[in-house]
Amino acid sequence: MSLKIDVLEEKKNPLINRTEIKFRIDHFEKSTPNRLEVKKKISEMKKSKEELTIIKNLDSHFGASYSIGKVNIYDNVKDLKLFEPFHIRVRNLPKDKRSEIYKLKRKKEAYEHLFEY
């Protein structure tokens, strides 16, 4: 699916070393785009590393043919780990890695090595 992403608002947060972007995706007669596709497209648009790009939320309203979302692009891994909650970091991974992380977490085993950074 070819995504057309319109940036509604973009601001740099120097205290946290990240760029915060609010965007809109039109998807008339199509389903809401996959979070990983959106992440890849935004990291290409902003020329940032995909592993440091975090889709915070992606909302579609009933009957609407567009989605509004927020993304945070971090300058380094240390700040990403500090400011992004665990469930958001996991949500931005492929499905197979998500299930593996949750399985290891339930068993109380190490899972940090499965994150892409």
Image (tube, helix red, strand yellow):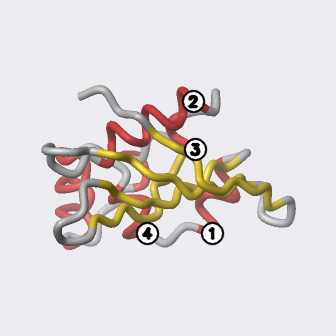
* Residue 27: image location, x then y, percent: 26, 44
Q: Secondary structure at mark 2?
A: helix
Q: Earlier in the sequence, mark 1 or mark 2?
A: 2
Residue nearest the observer in this picture, 88 or 12: 12
Q: Which residue is mark 3?
A: 52
Provide residue 81's location: percent of width, then percent of height.
Answer: 59, 61
Q: Amino acid at mark 4?
A: Phe
What's the amino acid at mark 2? Met
Q: Residue at label 2?
A: 45
Per the model, the C-alpha gap separating discs 1 and 4 is 9 Å
**Left or right, residue 2 beside residue 77:** left
Disc 1 marks a residue whose amino acid type is: Phe
**Which percent across, then down, holds residue 101?**
27, 57
Of tags 3 and 4, the one toward the viewer is 3
Three-letter amino acid code at disc 3? Answer: Leu
Q: Residue under label 4, please give it.
A: 86
Q: Earlier in the sequence, mark 4 or mark 2?
A: 2
Q: Give the numbered dot on residue 39.
A: none
- Please give the residue where the numbered disc 1 appears in the rendered image: 83
Closer to the chain start, of discs 3 and 4, is: 3
* Image point (33%, 37%), residue name: 37
